[in-house]
Amino acid sequence: MAVGWSQDGAVQDQIDASVQDAVKLARSRMPDGQSLTHCEQCEEVIPEARRKAVPGVRLCVSCQAELEKRETPLQGINRRGSKDSQLK
């Protein structure tokens, strides 16, 4: 049941939009193309198992972990179309 200015299903629409945004971001970060045999950053050998598991891999596990630490995490709230976001 909707309350206030929102339509029926508006909350679920926001949840679906958040999930779709997260999937789109994850897909955009996935490597593609041919895997490298050595890491782009540290020149460490990338194991064959990793190259097979992640097609297009360009970084070793440790460099990939460091890159992921520096990336900005997703915000947990999708305020698209939210009445509150228009008031601020």
Image: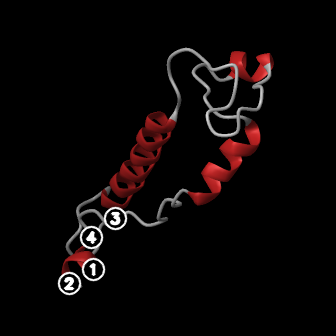
> Answer yes or no: do the residues labelled 3 and 1 have beta carbons within 8 Å?
no
Secondary structure at numbered mark 2:
helix
Q: What residue does disc 1 label?
A: 84
Question: Quick one: label 4, few (<14), some, or many (20+) residues within 10 Å?
Answer: some
| Mark 1 Cα-neighbour bin, 10 Å: few <14, some 14–19, many ≥20 | few
**Closer to viewer: mark 3 or mark 2:** 2
The kind of residue on which mark 2 rests is Leu
Dot 2 or dot 4, earlier in sequence: 4
Rendered view: 40 above or below 82: above
Residue, disc 4: 82
Do the numbered discs 2 and 1 sit on residues whose CB atoms are within 8 Å?
A: yes
Query: Pointers 4 and 1 in contact (CB under 8 A)?
Result: yes
Residue 25, percent from left and from top: 44, 43
Q: Quadrant of residue 51?
A: top right
Which numbered disc covers residue 87?
Answer: 2
Instruction: List the residue tagged with mark 3.
Output: 1
- Under circle 1, the secondary element is helix
In the image, what residue occupies the spot 49% across and 59% down? 74
Q: Is residue 27 above or below residue 87?
A: above
Q: Residue at x 36, y 61 (%)?
A: 11
* Residue type (three-letter) at the residue carrying disc 1: Asp
Residue at 47 percent across and 65 percent down: it is 75
Residue 37 position, x and y percent, is 69, 19
Which quadrant of the view contains residue 84?
bottom left
